């Protein structure tokens, strides 16, 4: 009998096929997002699961699934996992670091450019048939090259964005992180450490790349927005909840800051209704890692994590330590 696993969301058929050679796979190629009760039911009796950010693994689910040994998240972020509860239950947690770093940094830059240069706002204007003549200030935005970028969260993706900014766009890069990087690494990515307030006051553009946790909840709220330049843009490719979306919508409405680019939202896939009506925000549906090549690498790494642990007793990209 092959060990039984759940693949909780639709994935590439070739990855499913690969997993089926080793496991008895319960798949979800219809891609319905399970309620917590449905997820628990589907997970019951399984030894492993491949999840995405939409599946919450918590103590209640773990208590109902005593056979579970490993959950492999197809994401680098893992705020959908209660890791201490998983460790206590002896369940290995894994994620997909590295394979999405450069692709996600590319997207951070795309969103920065689209926001500062008002790409989607001007496209909507054109599509609506409003474009009748050229004018000197039509959709005039903010300079990107040569400006100051403030990055909050300086992990692998933050560093990738810093390199793009410093080397490709001649930007001054400030970053804020729990702890400063070693000097050699700062030099390599062309970035300088700053306190959060100093960064917010100095930056022409602020980019959020910090993992979500209780400590980083509402890293940017009304008080932080009040420190930013009125011409500044804010880009969030990290997680919903890092920004107070209601406060941001209000700031965009009153033009307290110039514009925002958001790939992630509090309570997504719901989006704060005021963000849907203000023109000076670029909104994308959590697609920062979405290239076919990268998503395939993420799916394969999640699959490797299941095979490695369940078949070979090895760990590849673990988030906790458990004894088998
Ligand atoms: C995922 C992400 O697509 O890796 C992450 O943390 O946010 C995205 O790359 C998303 O979480 C689905 O699992």
Image (cartoon, rainbow, N blue to C red):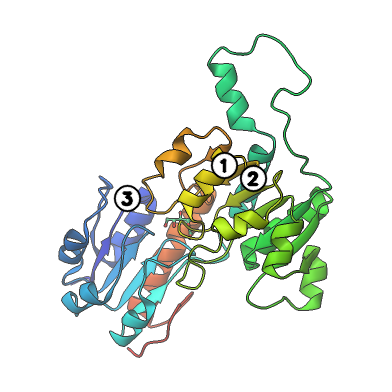
**Residue 91 shown left or right of residue 279 in the figure:** left
* Image position, residue 179 (x, y; %): 67, 78
Mark 1 neighbour class, 10 Å CA radius: few under 14, some 14 to 19, many 20 or more:
many
Mark 2 neighbour class, 10 Å CA radius: few under 14, some 14 to 19, many 20 or more:
many
Residues at discs 3 and 2 in contact (Cβ within 8 Å)? no
Quarter of the picture containing the N terminus is bottom left
Disc number for residue 191 = none
* Image position, residue 33 (x, y; %): 27, 51
Q: Residue at x 71, y 43 (%)?
A: 231
Q: CA distance from mark 3 to mark 2?
A: 39 Å
Disc number for residue 257 = 2
Viewer-closest of 299 and 97: 97
Residues at discs 1 and 3 in contact (Cβ within 8 Å)? no
Task: Return the disc, 3 or 2, that comes first in the chain's sequence.
Answer: 3
Q: CA distance from mark 1 to mark 2?
A: 6 Å
Q: Residue at x 59, y 13 (%)?
A: 130
- Choose top left, top right, bottom left or bottom right for residue 152: bottom right
Q: In the picture shown, does residue 53 fall above or below 184?
A: above
Label 1 sits on a secondary structure element that is helix
Quarter of the picture containing the C terminus is bottom left
**Residue 122 shown left or right of residue 265 in the figure:** right
Residue matched to label 1: 252
Q: In this rendering, does residue 264 appear at all?
A: no
Viewer-closest of 77 and 312: 77
Q: In this rendering, does residue 168 appear at all?
A: yes
Residue matched to label 3: 10
Q: CA distance from mark 1 to mark 3?
A: 36 Å
Q: Nearer the viewer, mark 3 or mark 2?
A: 2
Residues at discs 1 and 2 in contact (Cβ within 8 Å)? yes
* Image position, residue 180 (x, y; %): 71, 76
Q: Residue at x 58, y 36 (%)?
A: 280
Q: In the picture shown, does residue 3 fall above or below 168?
A: below
């Amino acid at each position: 009998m092959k060990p039984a696993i759940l693949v909780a969301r639709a994935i590439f058929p070739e990855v499913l096929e690969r997993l089926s050679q080793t496991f008895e796979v319960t798949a979800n190629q219809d891609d319905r997002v399970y309620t917590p009760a449905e997820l628990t039911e589907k997970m019951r009796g399984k030894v492993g699961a491949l999840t995405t950010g939409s599946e919450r693994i918590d103590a209640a689910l773990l208590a109902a699934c005593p056979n579970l040994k490993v959950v492999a998240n197809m994401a680098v972020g893992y705020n959908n996992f209660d890791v201490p509860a998983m460790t206590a239950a002896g369940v290995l947690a894994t994620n997909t670091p590295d394979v999405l770093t450069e692709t996600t940094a590319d997207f951070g830059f795309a969103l920065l450019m689209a926001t500062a240069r008002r790409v989607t706002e001007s496209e909507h204007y054109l599509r609506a048939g409003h474009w009748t003549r050229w004018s000197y200030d039509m959709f005039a935005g903010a300079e990107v090259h040569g400006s100051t970028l403030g990055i909050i969260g300086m992990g692998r993706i933050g560093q990738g964005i810093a390199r793009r900014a410093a080397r490709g766009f001649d930007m001054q890069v400030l970053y804020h992180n729990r702890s400063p990087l070693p000097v050699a690494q700062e030099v390599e990515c062309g970035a300088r450490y700053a306190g959060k307030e100093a960064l917010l006051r100095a930056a022409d553009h602020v980019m959020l790349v910090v993992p979500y946790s209780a400590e980083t909840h509402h890293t940017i709220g009304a008080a932080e927005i009040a420190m930013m330049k009125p011409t500044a843009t804010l880009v969030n490719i990290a997680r919903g909840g890092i920004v107070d979306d209601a406060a941001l919508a209000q700031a965009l409405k009153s033009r307290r800051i110039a514009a925002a680019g958001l790939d992630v939202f509090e309570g997504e896939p719901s989006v704060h209704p005021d963000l849907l009506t203000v023109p000076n925000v670029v909104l994308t549906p959590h697609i920062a890692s979405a290239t076919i090549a990268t998503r395939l690498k993420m799916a394969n790494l999640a699959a490797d994590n299941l095979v490695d642990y369940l078949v070979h007793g090895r760990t590849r990209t673990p988030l906790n330590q458990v004894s088998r």
